[in-house]
Amino acid sequence: MILQTNKIKVSNSLHKNIKQYLKNDLKISTDKCFREVIQACAEPRDAKQSTWITKDIVSAYEELNRLGYAHSIEVWTENRLVGGLYLVSIGKMVFGESMFFRKANVSKIALVALAKWLQKFGGKIIDCQQETNHLASMGASPISNIQFMREMKSMVEKPALPWAIEPVSEILLK
């Protein structure tokens, strides 16, 4: 399952939600609090679930972050972290790992911000890994393994994305 960055779908209700959050001081950042993002993603969704994001996984991804391969996209309102996602990036290829939200739709906002930022800097696809209705509703679609390997190979060989240049909130309305 991949999301072509130029095919991300922003529903009318999500677009309205983005405008409302922007009125309430929505901010997007990159790598400001990687550990907090991955720990929030590791929290079980309900009392019956466990998580694949163990302490060892957190440590491994923190090392990847330190080395410049793992990144977080954070969504803030009223100076509080309310959602985000983390990913691995090699060249211009992005492998989405996990998302979280503390307010409605903010993980979707993080994904929209990431996709639009990637478009600006030559990132064409996000490996979503999981085939879900949620991701499909945002424009993601399954592709064959052969096609994925071809796309991935061409993207990982490109120069790295400029992660020091953060997405700005206004990118969400473009």
Image: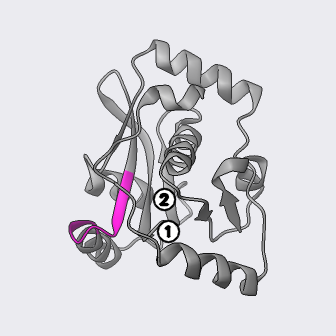
| Left or right: residue 34 compared with residue 153 | left
Residue 147 is one of the magenta-drawn residues: no
Q: At label 1, which amino acid type do we have?
A: Ser
| Left or right: residue 129 compared with residue 131 | left
The image quadrant of residue 159 is bottom left
Question: Where is residue 172 drawn, in percent x and y?
Answer: 55, 31
Question: Does residue 139 sit above or below 26 in this rendering?
Answer: below
Q: Nearer the viewer, residue 149 or 66?
A: 149
For numbered disc 1, what is the local secondary structure?
loop
Residue for badge 2:
44
The residue stretch that appears in magenta: 65-72
> Where does the N terminus fall, quadrant-wise?
bottom right
The image quadrant of residue 165 is top left
Residue for badge 1:
50
Alpha-carbon span between mark 2 and mark 1: 5 Å
Question: Where is residue 62 drawn, in percent x and y?
Answer: 26, 68
